[in-house]
Every structure is written in C-alpha cells, then in structure tokens.
C-alpha cells in the first residue's frame, strides 16, 4: 500500500503556516502565540509522517491513530490562528477594541465544536457519547467550579462594564492599570511595572475601586497633600497661600479644572493640620506629582512667612507674680483705650470713665461670612470693629439688600445696648473680623454715675439712626420712621432706669 501525504491536510498546514508568518510580520508582539501554532503544525507534519510510515509497514491501527491525531492537531492550530487573525489583526485594523476574554471564549467554543466534528469523523457515535457522559460531565464541572467561576466572573465584568481595560483600579493594597482580561484572571500593571494577576471570581465577590470618574473622558484623580502648620497662622491665609502655590505654577499632570483647594482638617497636638487637594490627570505619576506640589507649597509658605510645625507637647511654667499680671493687664488696657478713643459715641466720656468702660470690653472674633447680628434680634450689646470689614444689610421685605459697609474704628449695635430695641439691620462679616463687645452691664455703672451722658448719647444715636435711614433710602429699602432726639433720650433713660 503506497503511503501518500493527504492533500487536504497539506492545504490546511500550508494555510496555517501562511497565517502564522503573516501574524509574525504584522504583529510581532503576538510572536509567542504564532510560534506556538507553528509548533502544533510541525507536530501535525510529524504525526502524518508517522502515519505514512506505519502504512508502509502495514500497521493499520497505528496508521489510523497517527492520522487522526494529525487531523486533530491541524484543526486546533487552524482554530487558534483563525481567532488570532480575527481578533488581533482584522478587528484591530478596523479599530474595534475587544478584550482578550472574548477571543479566549470564541476560541474555546470553536475548539469544542471541532472536537465533536473530529470525533464524528473518527467514527464515534456522538449521541451515545452525550448520553453516557452526563455523570462524567457533572464530575468534571464540580471539580472545575473555581475555573468556571473565573470564566463567568470575567464575562460578568465585561457585560456590566464595571472594569474595563485601561481603567485605573485599586484592590486592597494593589493599585494599577487594567491591561488585560482573560478567561481566568484580570491583569493589573502597577506603577512599579509589576503585573498582578487577580482571579476574576475574586473581583466579582469583593470590592474594588475605579480611580477617576466614568463620566469624564480624561482621568482626574483627587490627591491629598498634608501639611502641619504653626497654630499662629490665620487659617484663611494659609489656605489661600496653598491654593495659589498650585494655581500659579505650571506643574505637569496637575489639572486646571477643578481648581485646587486647601482646607483646615484638624487642630491637634501643637499644630494645625491642612490638606491641599488637587486633581491628577495621570495616576501613574502620583508620587512624583505629589512631590512637586509639596515643593511648590513649601516654597510659597516660606515666602509668606508661615512656619511649619511638628507634633509637640509643651509644659509652660510661668512665674505669675503680681508685677507680670499687672503688666499684661496694662498692655491690654492701652489697646482697649486706643480703640475707644476712635469712637465718637464715647468722646464725651472722661479718661476715668473710658477706663471703666475699657475694663468691660470682651474680645469677639468672627470669620468671613459670619452673621454678626441679625435684623429683629434682641441683643443688649454693641460691637467695636478693630480690624476687618463688614456689610450692613436690610432684610425687610423678604429680600436682603446691602446698604452700607463697616471698617476698623466703626461701631454698630449701639441702639440695642442703649435702648434695648431689636436690631434694625443685619451685619455680615465680609472678611475675617475682629471686634470688641460691650454689653449693657459694662456701661450701666458709668451711665448711673453721670446721667447727663444720656443727653450726648441720644444726640449721637439719633444722628446714627438718620444715617441708617439715608442708606436705606439710597438702597430703596423702607424702614420704620426715625425717632426724634427726645424720644431717643426717653428710651435710654427708661432702659437704664435713670429718673
């Protein structure tokens, strides 16, 4: 019997070799897979040669086994090369991106079909095979439940698009970019160029974080850079310096929008803890960009004269003798008298009376945006502005209108302190505001000791009410009719109980 190389097998091997060489030429990155397919084709040739040799030696059983093996291996090689050409060459040329798990599943499905076809060509009764292999299939499925879980997990991840190739993700302590999704695992490349393989079933069962927003085409990841700042620095100034340090610099990978922001997060053991938050456009550059942002911020803090601080514990031992206490009290009294000297309302007071009033002043700081006093509220004290700015607003008519501004040396709330009437306007701090507060009890002693002060107070207070009404008129806001000086004097005397 003459041994002849089967022509259909030869054509299959020739097609396979041409496809493999084409893949090697056009997609060198897929060289290992193409070379594996060439190895299978070589094995096919060897098996066919064995079949031809056994035919010449009259070994029909060996001939049949070798020929069937050659056919099966040729089919496997063609299936692998065909799926590679479809997914890695044709679809790539059409700019259609498909994850590797799709190629794996299609390849596995076609191989399964080829296996049944090959068994049929080999003379196996497929109907009886399916009937008798039900138990075997169940045993195999039970033993491969982890593998099946990984396959189904990979399919689920792709169907719900919870994780895609190119996403930056964090899983426990692993942070990196998804580079591939296969039938068994998902490959994640870290910033250290390490590839971590995570089973698909673990991703389905456990929580993971996708960095950035899915709604944005560009990845933006908010980073937090921490600073320990001396408690003596004003928080608003520190935040402004930190924000401008990033906004005014050209730092690679830092997004312009959203703008960076700084916040005071904590006040702890001897320092204030600030966070400078910016948006990173490339997650791979997180540590290096953090370093550059931190360097710019430190330089800006030094230019602004703001000192860093460290955690510390202080035990302050001060020899508090009478001389020291008197010196501190005298310094504070000088500051208070200086503030009172700038207020026309207290111009008629003697130096002794001013000293008495100064002793009752209380320090009252406010932050930008604070409502210092609200229209209609009852408060028996006045405020003396030391530093900062405020805005007087009229809330009547259901709409807030700005009618005047206040600055250092201005006083407000005097009508409530002197007459007990509700506040006639709302005052809002437009910057960080530092004030002294004087209540009725602190001024009552001076008023009772010299009742004629009420005359001068009523004159000044009537003038202030007229000014407020003029501001309202300019802002087209309506208020109550202004009281006369006689009415104002009567209110003051009645409020302080002066006969």
Image (cartoon, helix red, strand yellow):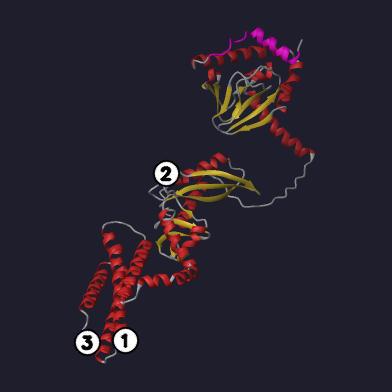
Image disc number at residue 3:
3
Report, in whole angstroms, how far the alpha carbon at label 3 lies from the one at label 2: 76 Å
Q: Is residue 83 left or right of residue 345?
A: left
Q: Can see residue 323?
A: yes
Q: Nearer the viewer, residue 231 or 21?
A: 21
Which segment did they paint magenta? 478-497
Decide: few, some or many residues near mark 1? Use Cα within 10 Å; few <14, some 14-19, many ≥20.
few
Q: In this picture, is 447 found above or below 286?
A: above
Percent x, y of residue 201: 48, 62
Compared with residue 196, is residue 446 higher up or lower down, i.e. above or below? above
Q: Quadrant of residue 494?
A: top right
Residue holding disc 2? 257
Determine if the magenta segment contains residue 492: yes
Q: Residue at x 49, y 66 (%)?
A: 146
Give percent across and percent down for residue 87.
Answer: 30, 62
Do the CB atoms of the residues marked 3 and 2 lie less than 8 Å apart?
A: no
């Amino acid at each position: 019997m003459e041994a002849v190389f089967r022509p259909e097998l030869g054509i299959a091997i020739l097609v396979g070799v041409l496809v493999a060489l084409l893949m090697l030429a056009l997609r060198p990155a897929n060289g290992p897979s193409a070379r594996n397919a060439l190895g299978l084709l070589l094995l096919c040739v060897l098996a066919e040669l064995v079949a031809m040799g056994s035919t010449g030696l009259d070994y029909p059983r060996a001939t049949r086994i070798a020929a069937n093996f050659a056919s099966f291996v040729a089919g496997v090689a063609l299936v692998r090369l065909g799926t590679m050409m479809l997914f890695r060459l044709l679809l790539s040329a059409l700019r259609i991106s498909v994850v590797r798990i799709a190629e794996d599943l299609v390849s596995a499905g076609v191989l399964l079909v080829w296996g049944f076809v090959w068994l049929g060509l080999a003379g196996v009764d497929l109907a009886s095979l399916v009937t008798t292999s039900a138990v075997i299939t169940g045993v195999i499925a039970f033993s491969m439940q982890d593998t099946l879980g990984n396959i189904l997990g990979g399919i689920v991840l792709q169907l719900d698009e919870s994780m895609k190739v190119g996403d930056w993700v964090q899983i426990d302590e692993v942070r990196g970019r998804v580079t591939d999704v296969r039938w068994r695992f998902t490959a994640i490349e870290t910033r250290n160029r390490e590839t971590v393989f995570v089973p698909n079933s673990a991703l389905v069962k456990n929580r993971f974080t996708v960095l950035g927003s899915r709604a944005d085409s560009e990845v933006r990841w908010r980073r937090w850079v921490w600073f320990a700042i001396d408690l003596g620095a004003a928080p608003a100034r520190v935040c402004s310096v930190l924000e401008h340090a990033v906004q005014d610099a050209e730092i690679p990978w830092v997004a312009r929008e959203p703008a960076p922001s700084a916040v005071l997060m904590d006040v702890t053991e001897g320092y204030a803890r600030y966070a400078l938050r910016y948006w990173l456009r490339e997650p791979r550059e997180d540590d290096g960009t953090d370093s550059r942002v931190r360097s710019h911020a430190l330089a800006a803090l030094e230019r602004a004269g703001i000192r860093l601080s460290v955690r510390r514990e202080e035990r302050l031992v001060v020899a508090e003798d009478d001389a020291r206490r008197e010196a501190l009290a005298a310094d504070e009294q000088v500051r208070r008298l200086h503030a009172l000297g700038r207020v026309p309302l207290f111009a008629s007071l003697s130096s002794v009376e001013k000293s008495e009033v100064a002793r009752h002043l209380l320090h009252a700081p406010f932050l930008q945006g604070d409502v210092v006093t609200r229209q209609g509220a009852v408060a028996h004290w006045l405020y003396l502005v030391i530093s900062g700015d405020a805005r007087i607003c009229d809330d009547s008519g259901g709409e807030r209108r700005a009618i005047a501004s206040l600055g250092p040396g201005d006083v407000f709330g005097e009508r409530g302190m002197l007459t007990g009437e509700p506040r006639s306007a709302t005052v809002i701090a437009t910057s960080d505001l530092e004030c002294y507060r004087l209540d009725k009890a602190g001024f009552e002693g001076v008023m009772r000791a010299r009742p004629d002060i009420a005359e001068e107070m009523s004159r000044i207070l009537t003038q202030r009410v007229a000014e407020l009404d003029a501001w309202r008129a300019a802002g087209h806001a309506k208020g109550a009719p202004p009281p006369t000086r006689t009415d104002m004097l009567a209110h003051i005397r009645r409020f302080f109980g002066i006969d």
